[in-house]
Amino acid sequence: MTKEYRLRDRNSFTVLFRRGKRADSAFFKAVFAKNNSGHGRFAFVVSKSVSKSAVSRNTLRRRARERLRKNGYAAGQGLDFVLIFKKEAAGLTRSKFYEELEKILEKVF
């Protein structure tokens, strides 16, 4: 995902968390709101409480980012979107991870 599709600055996060809508599941939390950029901007939050291993945290981020890219959620949606991983997400198998991710994405998009 290129830089234009990433939610990066502190001000954007602050506005999103104050004004955004929320969706919740057993493994993820999502915060989202419309933006004026004409395309989606995304961020993935995996804290150390999810997994102490940076390798596993990065794996979770890469899987989610790739799923969003492949399914075309970034193109033309005009949403700022933060996906927050819960502790339980680290223990999911790959297929179950994608299944649960699709469920939360259906709630948002």
Image (cartoon, rainbow, N blue to C red):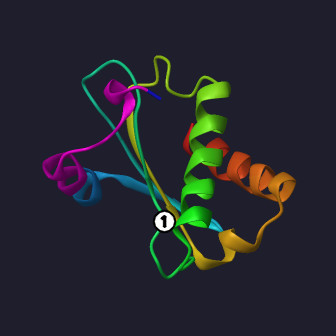
Q: Toward the viewer: 56 or 22?
A: 56
Q: Toward the viewer: 11 or 53?
A: 53
Side of 23 relative to 6 (left or right): right
Residue 106 picture quarter: top right
Q: Tell me what residue is drawn at x 56 percent, y 28 percent.
A: 73
Q: Is residue 46 above or below residue 82?
A: below
Q: Is residue 13 above or below residue 90?
A: above
The residue tagged 1 is 46
Q: Toward the viewer: 67 or 2?
A: 2
Q: Toward the viewer: 15 or 8?
A: 8
Quick one: quadrant of the C terminus?
top right
Side of 97 relative to 6 (left or right): right
Q: Position of residue 2 (x, y in %)?
A: 40, 25
Q: Which residues are magenta?
A: 2-15
Outermost residue, left direction? 11
Side of 12 relative to 54 (left or right): left
Q: Position of residue 41 (x, y in %)?
A: 37, 34
Principal SS element in the magenta part? helix
Q: Tell me what residue is drawn at x 49 percent, y 82 percent.
A: 49
Callout 1 environment at 10 Å: few (<14), some (14 to 19), or many (20+)?
Answer: many
Residue 11 magenta-highlighted: yes
Query: As shown in the figure, which amino acid type bears the numbered disc 1?
Result: Val
Q: Is residue 77 visible?
A: yes
Q: Tell me what residue is drawn at x 17 percent, y 53 percent.
A: 10
Q: Position of residue 17 (x, y in %)?
A: 28, 59
Q: Is residue 24 visible?
A: no
